[in-house]
Image (cartoon, helix red, strand yellow):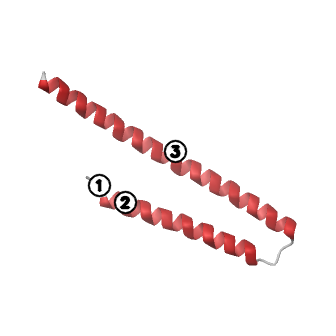
């Protein structure tokens, strides 16, 4: 069964990330800066997005591993009880 609280939290987090990306891109595009400065800003932004993506991915993998581990333990208990 799906956890609606987890889905809501995930959706909210995703909304913040997307909003941050859109805001950053618009800010960079409309800022009165030289091309070199803008390219530096874009490179920094891309690095920040990469870092954040790695953090989110790592957290998701850890959560999935935990769920799989719990499922394996539950199945082992059921298998032991069935014998």
Residue 61 image offset from top left, x and y in percent: 46, 43
Density class for disc 2 (Cα within 10 Å; few <14, some 14-19, many ≥20) is few
Mark 2 in CB contact with mark 3 (< 8 angstroms): no
Of the residues under marks 2 and 3, which one precedes in the sequence?
A: 2
> What is the quadrant of residue 29 in the picture?
bottom right
Q: Which mark is residue 2?
A: 1
Residue 14 image offset from top left, x and y in percent: 49, 63
Density class for disc 1 (Cα within 10 Å; few <14, some 14-19, many ≥20) is few
Cα–Cα gap, marks 2 and 1: 8 Å
Q: Which residue is mark 3?
A: 58
Q: Nearer the viewer, residue 62 or 2?
A: 2
Q: Which residue is mark 2?
A: 7
What residue sits 58% from the left and 48% below the top? 54
Of the residues under marks 2 and 1, which one precedes in the sequence?
A: 1
What residue sits 19% from the left and 26% below the top? 79
Residue 80 image offset from top left, x and y in percent: 17, 24
What residue sits 36% from the left and 57% below the top? 6
Hey, which residue is sitting farthest left in the picture?
Answer: 82
Number of labels in the image equals: 3
> What is the quadrant of residue 62 in the picture?
top left
Density class for disc 3 (Cα within 10 Å; few <14, some 14-19, many ≥20) is few
**SS of the residue at dot 3?**
helix
**Residue mark closest to the camera, 3 vs 1:** 1
């Amino acid at each position: 069964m799906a956890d609606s609280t987890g889905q809501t939290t995930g959706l909210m987090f995703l909304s913040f990330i997307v909003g941050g990306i859109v805001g950053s891109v618009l800010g960079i595009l409309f800022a009165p800066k030289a091309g070199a400065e803008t390219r530096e800003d874009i490179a920094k932004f891309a690095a920040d997005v990469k870092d954040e993506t790695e953090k989110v991915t790592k957290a998701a993998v850890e959560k999935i591993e935990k769920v799989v581990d719990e499922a394996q333990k539950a199945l082992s208990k059921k298998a032991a009880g069935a014998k």
